[in-house]
Amino acid sequence: MGTLMESAKVFFAEFMKLRSFLQQVAEIYQFVTRVIRNFFVPPYEGREILRQCFFVGNRSLFLITFTAFIAGVVFTRQSRPSLASFGAESWLPSLVSQAVVRSLGPLITGLICAGKLGSNIGAELGSMQVSEQIDAMEVSGTRPFSFLVVSRVTATTLMLPLLVVYADVVALLGSFLTVNFFNSSSFSLYFNEVATNVTYLDVFSSLVKSAFFGFAIGIVGSYAGYHSEKGTTGVGKAANTAVVVAMIMIFVIDLLSLQFINLFR
Amino acid sequence: MRFTENDTVKEAVNAKEGRQIVASIRDLHKSFGDRDVLKGVNLDLFESENLVILGRSGTGKSVLIKCMVGLITPDSGTINVLGKNVFELSPKELNKLRLQIGFSFQGSALYDSMTIRENLEFPLKRNLGIYDKNKLKDLAAEALEDVGLLHTMDQMPAELSGGMKKRVGIARTLILKPKIMLYDEPTSGLDPITSMEINELILSVREKYKTSSIIITHDISSAKHTSDRIVALIGGVNKVEGTFEQLKETTEPELEPFFKY
Ligand SMILES: Nc1ncnc2c1ncn2[C@@H]1O[C@H](COP(=O)(O)OP(=O)(O)O)[C@@H](O)[C@H]1O
Ligand SMILES: [Mg+2]
């Protein structure tokens, strides 16, 4: 009898956990659909979106430049010996360009932005939530959701593809300088080689993928911040959750998009 | 709305005195998880009165007034503000109602990424659609002047003291010319002199804007100065009611300590 009660209790506890998990999923689903609906419904947040776009670039550009350049250098240096051992050094630009455009560029940019922007958005909105600024906007009828959340998600979604193109260029530049360091080749020759090896599908799919990265980063950061718990620890937790979940999302989207794009190759 | 017989009598009396009810709360219940916070609150706010709600921390005073503006949805009960049932309004109608209610938050809730002026202009632009630069500036200046802080116009919230922030928070709601003001602990965390200035401000706001106000506080001297009537919120229900002088004689164990300072 006692054990039956015990197991009933355990079952009940598990049931409540599952219920709160499902509730959370439903809440996130609602949040996402609300953002998407607001994308297309006026009034649009033109000025605020521009301002947020600027922040997105401003906050991440230095880190992206630094990391993408080094990634280009390291990847080239490490690929060279293996290619050389096949006597296939001339394939280097082709290899590097595909690796950078298809995978390295988006991944580096995605992860850096997940860390930098995810935590920024989570902390910003979290502290606004905790200090009742969002409530204050709500009671003065100023539509905080579109002002704060939709503008940020729009900005990250628009900016990520641009940042990825930039990261690609920087990484390829790093790669070129590395190649040049060993045996001087001409800039135009190298980038010609790159251009002939990168297809439109590569570029297009990488841009779409990075737009999804941006969307995920914006959503995750905003959701964590908007629903952050009361108290100052809530802000830290929101920022932390945002980064971890956004990074996981980057990998998941990367994997899914790989499966999807392979349908077209 | 459910009125008991008693309410009808009370309403009749007040009607005779020519006072109208601008907000009424009936049998309001709210719990968070397994914590019952509000357990059947009944309350009326009369035209141009200053009603103080007195109660210890954590008794649900903030929850109560957040329900009044639809920030929190109660589990049961009704709230009627300016003739509208708050929980039956469409988002648009709720927005319109909120324009008539000024909410001064406990922590001021100034938008810390904006200047004081942008704080004040924010609801004008985004709610009323006023974009004319001169008009915005005039309105902001008037509201700031009302709270005596015209000179802070171009400062950031972080540069202001706690009392100044409270004033700016009040100015930001006054700019919309509200009919009802809800003050959430307007003097908490302030020194006695600054507190007194805020009390004076609350009185002068009523004078100028003809507002009816609910003032939440556990500051007995603030209650004394600002109240026409006091309601004590104890254990999630409205228990004792009366003027400051009447409540001074209370024998309610939860309330007595407030007056024995
Ligand atoms: N959004 C919320 N979620 C969960 N609990 C809440 C929430 N808001 C308030 N509470 C709880 O309700 C109780 C009353 O809170 P509050 O109204 O802020 O008290 P006070 O009378 O000091 O203003 C507190 O115990 C608080 O923890
Ligand atoms: Mg409170």
Image (cartoon, coloured by chain):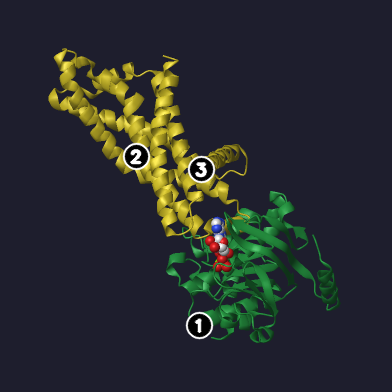
Find chain B in the image and tell me its colour: green
Q: Which mark is residue A17?
A: 3
Q: Circle 1 — which element?
A: helix
Which quadrant would residue A170 be assigned to in this image?
top left
* Left or right of residue A39: residue A256: left
Q: Which mark is residue A112?
A: 2
Q: Circle 2 — which element?
A: helix
Marks 2/3 in contact by CB < 8 Å: the verdict is: no
Q: Amino acid at mark 1?
A: Pro
Marks 1/2 in contact by CB < 8 Å: the verdict is: no
Distance of label 1 from label 2 (alpha carbons): 50 Å
The verdict on label 1 being within 8 Å of ligand 2 is no
Q: Amino acid at mark 2?
A: Ile
Which chain is disc 2 placed on?
A
Which chain is disc 1 placed on?
B
Query: Which chain appears yellow?
Result: A
The answer to whether residue A71 of the structure is visible from this angle is yes
Q: Which mark is nearer the camera, 1 or 2?
A: 1
Q: What residue is drawn where x is 67% and y is 61%?
A: B68
* Left or right of residue B130: residue A160: left
Indicate the quadrant containing the C terminus of chain A: top left, top right, bottom left or bottom right: top left
| Residue A186 against residue B248 in the figure, above or below | above
Distance of label 2 from label 3 (alpha carbons): 33 Å
* Left or right of residue B201: residue A184: left
Percent across and percent down for residue B76 are 70, 56
Percent across and percent down for residue A167 are 33, 33
Which chain is disc 3 placed on?
A
Q: What residue is drawn where x is 48% and y is 54%?
A: A229
Q: Amino acid at mark 3?
A: Lys
Q: Which mark is residue B192?
A: 1
Q: Circle 3 — which element?
A: helix
Q: Which mark is nearer the camera, 3 or 1?
A: 3
